[in-house]
Image (cartoon, rainbow, N blue to C red):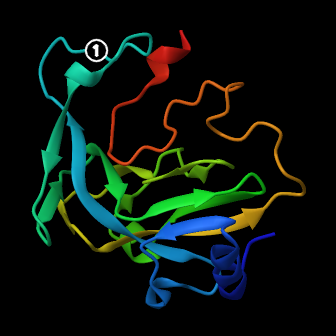
């Protein structure tokens, strides 16, 4: 069941979900608006570079930091990782679902490829997987509304929350964008 605005506020008070900072002006009927942070990661261009999922790719990406209120230009078909400003979290009985904003999708900006799930037990700055599908560059600004997060309640508490010893949790508590950690699975 998706939580309504009233249920989101109640769950915040009970500590079942976390949104920091929280402002009621960004609370939607069944979600919360999230804002773009100023840290990005993009692939370094160059011949002969190959992504090998069995290897650490830190050397294939570079971090970019923009100033407060400044723009990042995403070229057509460019891929970038970014964070939201808010730290969000859920207890072992809730999940979060990251969704794009319709107005951004209408200009060709996709905000996540597959990682739109906030696992039970995790608390972090969600990472966005930005792709510009339009034929024109898109300017996006630090602090702008970029996504929304809906919360759902599980039918029972999960047995293995994200970050527990029984899982290979690679992004527990992240507060700054980082490269894929897929290589740790091998």
Quarter holding residue 164: top right
* Residue at figure coordinates x 58%, y 30% from the top left: 169
Image: 83 above or below 86: above
- Which x, y percent locates residue 165? 67, 26
- Which x, y percent locates residue 170? 51, 30
Residue 132 seen in render:
no
Taking 141 as reference, is 123 left or right? right
Quarter holding residue 7: bottom right
- Which x, y percent locates residue 96? 63, 59
Image: 93 above or below 102: above
Of 134 and 112, nearer the camera is 112
- Which x, y percent locates residue 183? 45, 16
Of 118 and 110, nearer the camera is 118
Task: Report crowding for label 1: few under 14, some 14 to 19, many 20 or more residues within 10 A (C-alpha).
Answer: few
* Residue at figure coordinates x 14%, y 45% from the top left: 64
**How many tags in the picture?**
1
Image: 13 above or below 109: below
Q: Which residue is mark 1?
A: 50
* Residue at figure coordinates x 38%, y 13% from the top left: 52
């Amino acid at each position: 069941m998706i939580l309504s605005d009233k249920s989101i506020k109640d769950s915040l008070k009970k500590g079942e979900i976390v949104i920091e900072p929280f402002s009621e002006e960004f609370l939607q009927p069944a979600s919360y608006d999230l804002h773009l942070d100023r840290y990005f990661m993009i692939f370094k261009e160059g011949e002969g570079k190959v992504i090998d999922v069995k290897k650490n790719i830190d050397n294939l990406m570079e971090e970019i930091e923009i100033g407060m209120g400044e723009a990042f230009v995403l070229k057509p078909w460019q891929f970038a990782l970014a964070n939201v400003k808010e730290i969000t979290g859920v207890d072992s009985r809730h999940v979060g679902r990251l969704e794009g904003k319709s107005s951004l999708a209408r200009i060709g900006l996709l905000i996540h490829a597959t990682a739109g799930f906030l696992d039970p037990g995790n608390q972090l700055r969600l990472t966005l997987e930005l792709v510009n599908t339009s034929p024109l560059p898109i300017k996006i600004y630090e602090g702008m509304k970029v996504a929304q997060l809906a919360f759902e309640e599980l039918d029972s508490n999960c047995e293995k929350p994200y970050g527990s010893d029984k899982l290979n949790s690679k992004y527990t508590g992240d507060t700054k964008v980082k490269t894929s950690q897929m290589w740790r699975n091998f």
